[in-house]
Amino acid sequence: MNEHVDAVLPAARDGNHASNATTPGEARNPLLAALGDRVRNLRAQRGLTRKAVAVSAGVSERHLANLEYGIGNASILVLQQVAGALHCSLAELVGDVTTSSPEWLLIRELLEHRSEADLRRVRVALGELLGTASVDPARHRRIALVGLRGAGKSTLGQMLAEDLDVPFIELSREIETLAGCSVREIHDLYGTNAYRRYERRALEEAVQIYSEVVIATPGGIVSDPATFNELLAHCTTVWLQAAPEEHMGRVAAQGDTRPMAASKEAMEDLRRILNGRAAFYSKADLSVDTSGKTLAQSFQALRAVAHQSMRPGA
C-alpha cells in the first residue's frame, strides 16, 4: 500500500497503538508533527525501512506511519521502543537541542562520561572562547548568596554587607519593584516564564549598578541556566547550606512555608527540592554549612570566606 495513504488511516485500538489519533481532516498538532519529522529523518539517516523499524520496535507499521506523519499520540514507552530501533536516545527522538545538528552531536559525544570537574573547565573555556564570560574585574567584590529558603541568606547577607560596608539587596524585592507586584502575584498572573524574565533583568541591573554589593538571591535562581550563568560570571557565589530540618524550622519561624504550604508531606517535599537543586548550588565558588551553628557562628564562617575571596588575586 502507498505509504502516505497507509499513514493517514486511523490506528487500530491495540496495546501498541496510539490513543486519540488525529483524523485525516484535522490539523496536525505542531509538537506531534515535529516529532514525526524527527522520526522520519532519523530513519532516513540510518537507511532503514519503515517496516524494519516497526519490527525492531515491536509496533505495527501503520502505527509507525501515523507517528511519522504527526497524527499519532504515542506513549513514552512506545517512543522508547522506537528510539531503540533507530539506535538513538529518547532525547534525540523528542528534540533535545544537543541532537539538532551534526556539530551538536559531535560536541555531546566529546562531553559524555566526563567528570563534573572536566565539564566545568570546558564551560569556562567555552565562555572565554565565545566571549560570553569576559573577566569582570568587580566579580570578587560582589558576593551573591545562594541556597534554599531558610538558609539565612537575608539575615546573614545583611550582616555581611554591614561588616563590609557595602550595599545589601534582596533580589526578590528588586523583582517585585520591576514587576510592580509581589512574587506570588507574578507567578499567579503571568506565570513562571515571566518571573524568570524579571529575575534575569533584576540581576543584570544589580550587576550594572553595583560594583560592590552583597546579594541575597531567590532559592530557585539556579533553575534558569542563563540567569545562573550570569550570576556565576559577575559575582562570587556562596552556597549557604543547612540540614532540611533546619531549613523547615527557619521558614516556619518566618511564618511562611512556601513552597510546601499545600503539601501534607512538607519535609519530603523540601528534601526533594534540596536534592534537585544541590548539584546546581554546588557550582558556587564557596560554601558555608550553617547546620547546627548559632547565628554568630554562621556569620563568622561566612565572614571568613567572604573576606578571603575579596582579597586581590583571590
Image (cartoon, rainbow, N blue to C red):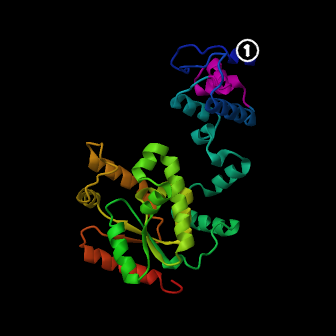
The residue range painted magenta reads 48-71
Measured as percent of width and height from the top left, residue 148 is found at 37, 59
Residue drawn at the location 52% of the way across and 64% of the way down: 203
Q: Is residue 8 shown above or below 235?
A: above
Nearer to the camera, 279 or 28: 28
Nearer to the camera, 172 or 295: 172
The kind of residue on which mark 1 rests is Val
Judged left or right of residue 152, residue 121 is right
Residue 265, quarter of picture: top left
- Kindly give the residue lying farthest to the bottom in the view shown: 312
Measured as percent of width and height from the top left, residue 7 is found at 69, 18
By secondary structure, the bulk of the magenta-drawn segment is best described as: helix
Nearer to the camera, 70 or 102: 70
Q: Is residue 269 shown above or below 38?
A: below
Residue 93, quarter of picture: top right
Q: Is residue 226 magenta?
A: no
Measured as percent of width and height from the top left, residue 3 is found at 74, 18
Judged left or right of residue 310, residue 53 is right
Judged left or right of residue 90, residue 277 is left
Residue hosting label 1: 5
- Kindly give the residue lying farthest to the front in the view shown: 180
Residue 115 appears in the picture as rendered: no
Residue 299, quarter of picture: bottom left
Mark 1 surroundings: few (<14), some (14-19) or many (≥20) residues within 10 A: few
